[in-house]
Image (cartoon, rainbow, N blue to C red):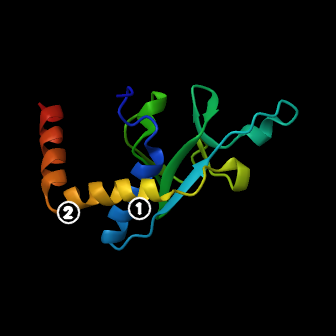
Amino acid sequence: MPSPPSRYTCVRSGLFVVRLLAEQGIVGVLRSGVPLADEREPASASFGFRAAGEWESHAWVEAGGFVIDITADQFGDAPVIVLPVHDRRYASGEGSTALPAPGPKSVEAVDIVWQAWTCGTGREHFASLSRATDS
């Protein structure tokens, strides 16, 4: 398992957050950015998540004027970030500066997790993890 466990899960995790927000009547949008490698135009590289002075390919959710990121720990940041959308560490891209649209396997993975979450086992597991970290 990669360390931390959130590594390479930002799209699936973001899809889960979008679904969770929708259940509460809140519209969330999955955003992403991929830095371009172009030494002639450094500004063209400014997409994704800025960590330790470098732009990283990343996906997150925007809702209600906020960035919601539950996988930033893969870059050494906090495991959960909720910030205003104008935070300079996030820059969404389009086309070649964005991650590909989530494929069927990502959606299927979220469906499986969602089933566990809605039948209670996911919530119980999360609650037990929260209790363990509180002590």
Mark 1, secondary structure of its residue = helix
Query: Residue 117, percent across and down?
Result: 21, 57
Indicate left or right for 1 with 39 as reference.
left
Residue 118: numbered disc: 2
The residue depicted at 64 percent of the width and 50 percent of the height is 98
Q: What residue do we see at 39% from left, 45% from top?
A: 70
Label 1, residues with CA under 10 Å away: few <14, some 14-19, many ≥20? many
- Marks 1 and 2: which is nearer the front? 2
Kind of residue at badge 1 = Val
Q: Could you tell me if residue 114 is visible in this image?
A: yes
Reading the image, the residue beneath label 1 is: 18
Label 2 residue SS: helix
Residue located farthest toward the front when viewing the structure as drawn: 105
Q: Position of residue 11 (x, y in %)?
A: 47, 50
Q: Residue furthest right?
A: 40
Which quadrant does the N terminus fall into?
top left
Q: Residue at x 69, y 56 (%)?
A: 94
- x and y, in percent, of residue 129 in the image: 17, 39
Camera-side residue: 46 or 120? 120
- Dot placed on the residue nearer the N-terminal end, 1 or 2: 1
Hey, what amino acid is under mark 2?
A: Thr
Q: Where's the C terminus, which quadrant?
A: top left
> In 3D space, how far apart are the residues under numbered discs 1 and 2 (Cα atoms)?
15 Å
